Amino acid sequence: MASGSQEAQNNFSLIGKEAGFEDISASCGNGLPELCGKGGYDLIVMALPLENEFGLETALHVSKLCPGGLLIISPSKIYEEVCAKGAKISAPILPRSASKAQVINIMRFLLSVRQRSIAANEETARLQGIVDEMKLVNRAKCVLIEYLRLSEQEAHYQLRKRAMDQRITLTDAALDILKIYEYQKPLGG
């Protein structure tokens, strides 16, 4: 929670607790980009204006740095202007006159989006690992085909047999084969 007003920090900290956030930090906004760069935040709430600046430039910077969500609370009188100027910021902007229920709903929504994003990133990393393993195994098969003049089916069999005989994974067997054959010249070459 970042705001130039201690009252806003206290109010939004209480709302954050009602929304289900347990560990809440409040700040006047000084050094916010550096804090976000360190990570560990599920949600950043910025109630404008901040202590030493209005805060839209900081909000833009934070939205790029912070993998968690960002919620901007604007003074109600200039809400439309803040929305227009903050169009480049990938964060919802609410007027300070928004109801507590609206703020809680947006906070919960942003947390849900963050959790889905984390799950999607983990799944992407898992799938990338599978693709990398498949590439490694296929490269090892190609090496066996090239150096031992095996068919693809025979190369696959040899790779699987090596893994079973040595009680290692197919990936480790592929790595072993690559260590043995990749630094040799092909037969007849």
Image (cartoon, rainbow, N blue to C red):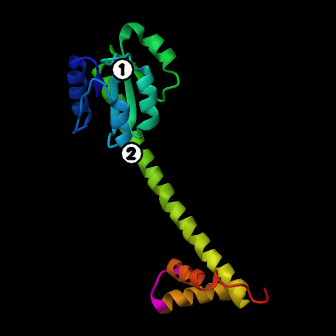
**Camera-side residue of 63 and 73:** 63
Q: Disc 2 to disc 1, how far (Cα)?
A: 22 Å
Would residue 75 be found to the left or right of residue 170 on screen? left
> Which residues lie in the magenta part?
166-170
Residue at the outermost bottom position: 165
Residue 167 part of the magenta-drawn span? yes
Query: Label 1 belongs to which residue?
Result: 73
Figure quadrant of the N terminus = top left
Would residue 90 be found to the left or right of residue 174 on screen? left
Above or below for 94 versus 167: above
Above or below for 186 versus 47: below
Residue 64 part of the magenta-drawn span? no
**Camera-side residue of 28 and 14:** 28
Q: Which mark is residue 53?
A: none
Figure quadrant of the C terminus = bottom right
**Residue drawn at (61%, 88%), measured in percent from left and top?**
157
Q: How far across and how far down the image is residue 6, in percent?
A: 21, 19
Q: Magenta span: helix, strand or loop, mainly?
A: loop
The amino acid type found where label 2 is placed reads: Gln
Taking the image as drawn, is residue 78 in sight? Answer: yes
Q: How far across and how far down the image is residue 98, in percent?
A: 34, 17
The amino acid type found where label 1 is placed reads: Ile
